Image: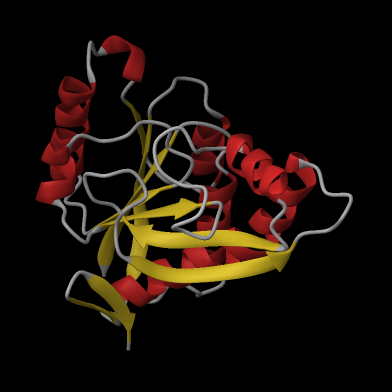
Amino acid sequence: MKNIIVLVSGGGTNLQALIDSEKRGGIKGGKITCVISSKEGAYALERAKNAGIPAVVIPRKEYGDSKSYSEAILAELNRQQADLIVLAGFMTILDECVTKAYEYKIINVHPALIPSFCGEGFYGLKVHEKALEYGVKVSGATIHFVNEKADAGAIILQGTVAVENDDTPETLQRRIMENVEWKLLPKAVSLFCEGRITIRDGKAFVD
């Protein structure tokens, strides 16, 4: 049984999707064993508590730079014997000391179809604002491995939704979360824990 560690910063809706999926038996071969938050008082911590999952807070504001913060995260991941790390609304880009130590073991969800509307500065509603500004007809989410570059790791799964004429960033965000993120993130986690993802030439293939 693989140890799944979920990193959070806010409300934890994707964490809840993972918890619900695990309860239904949707995550095979793995178990959420710890939640790490970058902020005190994040509602995600309440979700972890309600599900009986141990949680640790490592406040980003207490560290002077990304490297020292990432080293603290890395030490905790090692302590928790992490097999898989899931970034679920985690708002800090981790230094390569973490991504190299856990190569192809960190999964993130990005609320757009990579390589569109991604990279540094593209997070939260900003992604959906740009997609609507561009006039795309479909959008969606990408589940991908994390490497040292923002949103540049191997793609595991992608899913789409139609963009409606009267969409706002908020309505598009909600549709993508409900129809893509909350379904595909638990699926990708299960695929990893079942050993069904292989890497060839830097690309992820699902067996």
Residue 122, image x and y in percent? 49, 38
Q: Is residue 44 above or below residue 174?
A: above
Q: Quadrant of residue 143?
A: bottom left
Q: Nearer the viewer, residue 73 or 47?
A: 73
Q: Nearer the viewer, residue 176 or 83?
A: 176
**Residue at the front extreme, as displayed:** 134
Q: Quadrant of residue 32?
A: bottom left
Q: Is residue 206 visible?
A: yes
Q: Answer left or right for 127 relative to 29.
A: right
Q: Nearer the viewer, residue 74 or 151?
A: 151
Residue 2, image x and y in percent? 25, 65
| Residue drawn at (23%, 10%) of the image | 64
The number of numbered discs placed on residues in the rendered structure image is 0
| Residue drawn at (37%, 66%) of the image | 155
Q: Is residue 29 visible?
A: no
Q: How is the image coloured?
A: secondary structure
Q: Is residue 114 above or below residue 48?
A: below
**Residue at the bottom extreme, as displayed:** 207
Q: Is residue 104 above or below residue 28?
A: above
